[in-house]
Image (spheres, grey):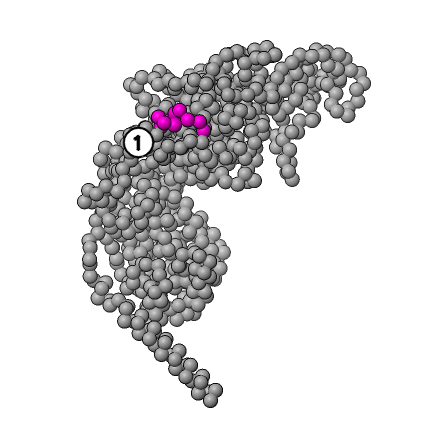
Amino acid sequence: MKKKKINSIASVVAVIVFLLLFLLLRELPSPTRLTSSERYNVTTQIFDRHGELLYEIYADENRVPIYLKDLPPYIAEATVAIEDERFYHHLGVDAIGVFRALLNNLRGKSIQGGSTITQQLVKNALLTKERTISRKAKEAVLAVLTEIVYSKKDILEMYLNYVSYGGTAVGIESAAKQYFGKSAKDLSLAEAALLAGLPQAPSRYSPFASDATAAKKRQEEVLDKMKKQKYISDLEAENAKGEILQYAISRTDIKAPHFVFFVRDLLYQQYGVETVEKGGLRVTTTLDLSLQETAQASLSAEVDRLQNYRVSNGAAMVIKPNTGEILAMIGSKDYFDNEHDGQVNVALALRQPGSSIKPLMYATAFQEKVLNPGTVLLDAPTCFAVINQANYCPKNYDGSFRGPVSVRDSLGNSLNIPAVKALKALGLETFIKQANAMGISNWQDPSKYGLSLTLGGGEVRMIDLAQAFAVLANKGIKVPVVAFLEIKDYKGKSLYQLDLEQRAADFAVLAEYKRGEKSGELSRVMDQAPAYLAAHIMQDNQARTAAFGPRSELVIPGQIVSAKTGTTNNLKDNWTVGFTPEYLTIAWVGNNDSSPMNPYLVSGVTGAAPIWHDIMAFILRGQEPLWPEKPDDVKSAPVCATGMPPEKCEPRYTELFWEEGVASRSKVEKRNTWIKADTGLPPATGESEEELVLEEHSFYTDPIVENYCLDCRRAVDAEGKTVYEKNLVH
């Protein structure tokens, strides 16, 4: 009786399974549908702001069949390693992969994953791309049937001939021709690994994408998996990772390539690959091709001139701060220079900004009412305690100390010790929060950074740095950077239009607001006065003369321009950023592999500064100088060491200040004190007080250091160097 019951249950289960399979098979598409066409594909065109065609994106299939036996074995091995490591051990469906996908789906993630090479083949050939359980079930049934009919070799060969590698390249042979200008049978291991990584996400992993580093990381991931699965040795993997790939790029069919691929990726994100490659978009961008080509020529010529200084690359951007429009984006000296990774768009890459970040920090200190332009900071030997690490003892670029300096002179001459003191007084988290609001997108975890952040110790993207400095140019208003003026379909239907009049109206509204207000896409992320004061110091040529001289590359004759340089301590990056209320230019030179430049380059106004100067002078030629309008709550008066007008102190100089600001802790006083005869200094706490003499001296206090004796006689060592106080840790 029990056996009969089991047989009945088994029969019911068998009938249910049969019915499910019948329903699935009945709904499976006929192969004849592969030759039908319900629509035709239309090319997407990208134009500059004046209607000049920059590039066309299209997805007509270019397929050249090839046999597996004619290919190097590592092409198939790379594909199996990255796409389906258990390919030779399953019957079309990988149970382990399916289980992992089910777990992800149960956790609320998208329906995804678990697809074998066989499943990908039938999905691309016969099924839609919808992400549903029904489609996955059909895919699984077809995959099993395919495994029954064909051998593993046949399936792998069909996959390599059918899968898309991005753009028009369908199949490994077409991909090899498109990316490397050679037949697939001639691909090296390094080239094969790069191509094997593309099918999962061709637009993301393409070496021609706006972020070419993703392609390199993906290639290394493929090689690591090949090594792990014993297809190649450790040495073969390392040699392949180190191989410089020579891409086949046509110079004739693309203008402003870094910008174009940046725009293409934005379009992919907004409209999807299918629409961009087949939907016939007509994209008018913000780019000014004439300015782009002039800037590119200037940058390339300057980088060539710097070859003897171990500089191989440069990058630059031009934006309009008050509208957010990108007018030029140069990602490298030469996009087609494979030897120096020309396809990498440095405008989107993470690099250390050096001292170019200091104006953002000082502006934040003004905003938080910690400092004022006239606040006195002591440029003297100072160390800072770091938990579980050695003390941090910053040095100035020339190794000297200047004693008491105002914030204006400290920023103008790019002094390091006062800048670190300023950040210490301000607070690291406060600065990071403000920098995020201004546009620095990748500083998220304050625990990863220290006080060196104000000297460029945190990496940034050029495009984000331009966005942040545009806030200073806009007196505190953040206008999102934009690359599109208009997007239409090929029939003329408008899909997007940048409303510059609305942006101007929102800008005017926010001009009257305090920090924290928004209007449309725009937001006030800093009050007017702090932003204006930082920009004013940047345009003060006298404030930087001691370090840069009176006629440096930061001066545009006949114009009022705010500017700042930046060089990293390891000499890997050299920057210049500068702006007027209407134009902002930022330039960088260095090496993509982060090898250091020649130290003779980094005088502060060599390297990036001439590039910046040439571009900015070209933009401003023939224009009347534009003075930034001073906010009503910024006043000018004699101030004392606090940076504010005097109450009980003696004024030191005339300076600008924010009426809402408060006096800093800085002060100066003369008083009689006991001095040790042997050191010329007051005795430290706990020191012997023998042989003391009473003397009058000037004592300075800044937000970090108290009672620093400026004019005390300090002893010198055997080499004639000044012996400073031992208790310098704060």
Does residue 308 lie above or below 490 as drawn? above
Does residue 416 lie above or below 151 as drawn? above
Does residue 276 lie above or below 580 as drawn? below
Q: Look at the image and tell me whether residue 607 can be seen.
A: no
For label 1, the crowd category at 10 Å Cα-Cα, with few meaning under 14, some 14 to 19 and many 20 or more, is: few
The magenta segment: 507-515
Where is the C terminus found, in terms of image quarters? top right
Q: Which residue is mark 1?
A: 502
Residue sitting nearer the eye, 595 or 292: 292
Relative image position of residue 28 (x, y in whole percent): 28, 68
Relative image position of residue 687 (x, y in whole percent): 77, 24
Q: Residue at x 21, y 52 (%)?
A: 41
SS under mark 1 = helix
**Residue 93, picture quadrant:** bottom left
Relative image position of residue 194 (x, y in whole percent): 38, 52
Tell me if residue 669 is in the magenta stretch.
Answer: no
Q: Residue at x 36, y 37 (%)?
A: 331
Tell me if residue 511 is in the magenta stretch.
Answer: yes
Residue sitting nearer the eye, 174 or 457: 457
Q: Residue at x 42, y 67 (%)?
A: 94
Task: Say left or right for 349 vs 170.
Answer: right
Check disc 1 and give the amino acid type: Gln
Relative image position of residue 588 (x, y in whole percent): 41, 32
Task: Say left or right for 478 vs 178.
Answer: right
**Residue 555, picture quadrant:** top left
Task: Say left or right for 298 vs 100.
Answer: left
Residue sitting nearer the eye, 662 or 424: 662
